[in-house]
Image (cartoon, rainbow, N blue to C red):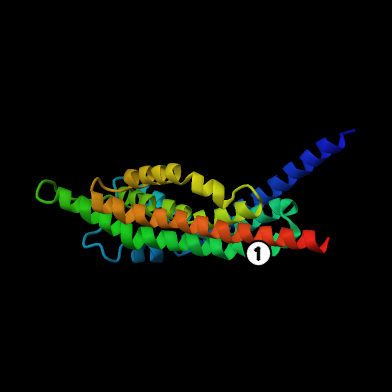
Amino acid sequence: MAAPNEQSVIGHLEEMRSRLIRTLAAFLVSMAAALIYVRDIYQWLVRDMEEQLVLLGPSDVMWVYMMIAGAVAIAVTLPVAAYQIWRFVQPAVPPQAQRSALMLIPGISLLFLIGICFGYFILFPMVLHFMNEMAAGEFAVLYTAQKYFTFMIHMTVPFGLLFEMPAIVMFLTKLGILNPIRLAKARKLAYFVLCIVAVTITPPDILSDIIVIVPLFLLYEISISISKFVYRKQLRAGQQNEVSG
């Protein structure tokens, strides 16, 4: 017969497995739905292209469609994954913080979409224009569909994830894992890491770096402000409980 601690661990693992399966099922359903409309999505994504994209092999078209559908499925599945994570960690969250923590789920979805829009409407065309200018007069530019959409996803999806920073910081502050003091002390290191990220994913010119670095720095400062607000609210609630007790 298993000890109580072993039963608890087994129960947690079973719950984690079931929530992972639900998230995966949501991803697969979303991907299947996206594949039904993938031609329309493709046409919208290449609406500004002057030339048709090129395929180098018979299987490339399926690879491109799967990649597009996969990116759409990630965006759709994100709130489902956030909800499943929330239900898994809910017992560890103080009762007074549970309602506000649950409200983070739509915030996570909104921040992801804002990050995607930043990458797609600002960063991607800027980087693509820079690359075209470098090739102008020296090379014949011919894009393959696979390379084009791989490049597009690399310029958009990571920003959807980076823009989740305020929501993640807020949640970890509610759990007591982070606080504004720790975040302020880690500011220099965080800025250094964010600069490396920005320089890595942008063209080698200072303007592109600044366009990416500034929003990332602002996100970090917003995260610190949110953490301060949550932390002070928790302190006031604790003081009130002590007085009433």
Visible residue check, residue 220: yes
**Which quadrant of the figure has residue 121?**
bottom left
Q: Quadrant of the C terminus?
A: bottom right
Residue under circle 1? 100
Whether residue 202 is situated above or below residue 241 in the rendered picture: above
Q: Is residue 25 visible?
A: no
* Percent of width and height locating residue 168: 56, 53
- Judged left or right of residue 141, residue 86 is right
Other-residue count near label 1 (Cα within 10 Å), few / some / many at <14 / 14–19 / ≥20: few
Q: Residue 77 sits in which quadrant? A: bottom right
Q: Residue at x 16, y 53 (%)?
A: 133
**Residue 52's x, y, as percent?**
25, 58
Q: How many marks?
A: 1
In terms of depth relative to the viewer, which is nearer, 170 or 232? 232
Q: Secondary structure at mark 1?
A: helix
Residue 238 sits in quarter = bottom right
- On the image, the x and y values in percent for residue 166 come to 52, 57
Horizontally, residue 43 falls left or right of residue 182, namely left
What amino acid is found at the position of numbered circle 1 in the picture?
Ser
| Image quarter (top left, top right, bottom left or bottom right) of the N terminus | top right
Question: Residue most toward the left?
Answer: 137
- Residue occupying the point 46% across, 53% down: 220
Viewer-proximal residue among 34 and 213: 213
Drawn side of residue 35 relative to residue 90, left or right: left
